[in-house]
Image (cartoon, coloured by chain):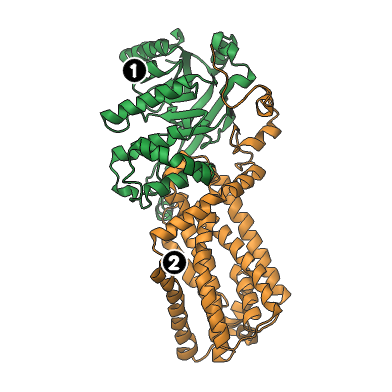
Chain colours: A orange, B green
Amino acid sequence: MVPAPRGYPPGDPKAEKEPVTQAPSSARQDEYLGEHHVYEPHKAGLPPLVPYFRELWRRRGFAFELARTTMHAQNTDTVFGQLWLVLNPLLLSAVYYLLVDVIGGGARGKDPKSFFALLTSGLFLYYYITGAMSTGATSVTQGGRLILNTSFPKMLLTVSTVYTAFRRYLPTFAVYLVIHILTGQRWGWHMLWLVPIFAMATMMGLGLANMFATLQVYFRDTTSFLPYVIRIWLYLSPVLWTIDKIKESKTGLYHVLYTWSPINPMYGILGAQGEVLVDGRSPSWDLLGYGLLWSLLLFVGGSLLFMSRERDFAVRL
Amino acid sequence: MISLSASELVGAQATPGPTAAAAAPTGVAIRVQNVHITYRTSLQKNPTLKSAIVRLGRRERVIREVKALQGVTFDVPHGKVMGVIGSNGAGKSTLMRTVAGILPPSQGRIEVNGRVSTLLALGVGFNSALSGKENVTLGGLAAGLTRAEIKAKYEEITAFAELEDFMDMPMRTYSSGMYSRLAFAVAVNMDPDILIIDEALSAGDAHFKKKASDKMQELVSKARTMLVVSHALGTIKELCDEAIWLHKGKLVGRGTPEEMISGYTKFLQVGEDAITLEDF
């Protein structure tokens, strides 16, 4: 005698909605659900998006827990660990300030105090985005066994690294606020613009993390190139120089930089943040536009790339 | 030589036996319909951009297409234990991962009704720098359990694995036996409707083996559905109600464990060419 199926008492709606021939369209909704799963070939390599993101949201606890344990393992949750998180970027800004303003003879177009505020805020946000990118790049290859053994939306891994980057960014932002006071920058309602700017930075960080995590599966030396990419990208972004400064140049390298800046994804976001924090005003629309465009583009592009290659992860690791 | 095609097998299964009759729509725990799995994999252990660039001029191919499963069809009724046998590379592990939803099929359809817990060849714990406790929690969260569910099961898992003193230590300090004990404890204690086990019953020492086998019997008696891969044919005979035999990605046969095992053993002895698999 066949025992009664567990979990499906007679009359259970779940049990009744399992006809032999289920319409594929409704069945596709069920890939990640707890009790009833249907697995079918992915259309154009992409998993069904609505259940994917619903499940990503439902399992967000994993991303937070992974970030927490990772930070615990790296000792960043101790007093000195936190102190190092602050000290490291602060020392870095001191180095760049020395390089640009003192040795470089003031490539700033602003007074030294304001330039220092601009430099630190830009540097901190830049390292938030690229930090998410570089730790996100290894998240899938390091997820090894979990990916081979468990069915879950793999984007949880990159989301987790972005959250780690956020947790590391927070103390540096607090440090910036102190610098903001010490250098006498303006406070006001315009600072609310930081929220959408930060949201754009987060989207861009996740998009880049997805993109490089995928590349890393196919080319395991991707992360060896990343430090160079990050360094060069920093020099091309409005962190060590100001947009005002390069705007003035009609010839030379600065002029070339200014002409091509819109194709730098960091240009809009960092420029807009600079205007809010140091110029003390709402950001100009063109900078916001570039920022939004690039963050959307990288987020959608990176995520689609990641999801379309997700099936491969289980056989390539 | 295999001359039995997938369609013939489907046809063979269309005449329902006593078990198939019981497997009315709601009674089917796992239904695998004409599933094909094809994937491309790199022959290199560590594919790098550098080697890809170096290779450009040589026109060397390092990508291989693997047809791991080719038109496999079967179903497992609720409460039945299905064994899967076959030689290395037959596609058994791929089949397990497909049913677990880790590897979506290239063609065909898989339906699974019930909560699934997997005990696959690679075990639990994806990060050896993290403690056993953290790995169990993370594994559970990734699998979609809530914190409360994991907490409720946690004591049971550690007690079953007999690792109470080790759970806060990084998993890199564990012995391989401890690894597999923990993996087994997690899989069987998650209260699954369907348990998918890939070659993992040889966990730990003699004492734990006994415990594991008792637990398996308990789960069987509680009418849990199971899909078991094992090269230990004795285990298959002991645990399973039915068995399927895979060879090179194709389903060779389905029947009682005794039938399949005797066919498979005969096949192993005489070799591939001397026997026509149509006999089964």
Q: Give x and y (percent) for residue B25.
A: 64, 19
Q: Give x and y (percent) for residue B246.
A: 44, 21
Decide which of A146, B67 is in the foreground and name it: A146
Q: Residues within 10 Å of mark 2 (few under 14, many from 20)?
A: few
Work out whether disc 1 and disc 2 sit on a shared chain.
Answer: no
Instruction: Indicate which label's residue lies in the foreground, 1 or 2.
Output: 1
The residue beneath circle 1 is: B234
- Is A46 drawn above or below residue B3 in the view shown? below
Decide which of A106, A38 is in the foreground and name it: A38
Q: Identify the residue shown where x is 34% and y is 17%.
A: B234
Left or right position of B143 against A259? left
Q: What chain does badge 2 belong to?
A: A
Left or right position of B69 against A189? left
Residue A83: quarter of image: bottom left
Residue A184: quarter of image: bottom right
Indicate the secondary structure of the residue bearing disc 1: helix
Q: Residues within 10 Å of mark 1 (few under 14, many from 20)?
A: few
Q: Contact, CB < 8 Å: mark 1 with mark 2?
A: no
The residue beneath circle 2 is: A227
- Is A213 drawn above or below residue A95 in the view shown? above
Q: Identify the residue shown where x is 45% and y is 89%.
A: A103
Specify the amino acid type for callout 1.
Gly
Indicate the secondary structure of the residue bearing disc 2: helix
Residue B58 seen anywhere in this rendered image of the structure: no
Q: Give x and y (percent) for residue A240.
A: 53, 80
Decide which of A180, A224 is in the foreground and name it: A180
Specify the amino acid type for callout 2.
Pro
Instruction: In the displayed orientation, state which residue is furthest to the left.
Output: B206
Q: Where's the N terminus of chain B, which quadrant?
A: top left
Q: Identify the residue shown where x is 58% and y is 46%.
A: A308
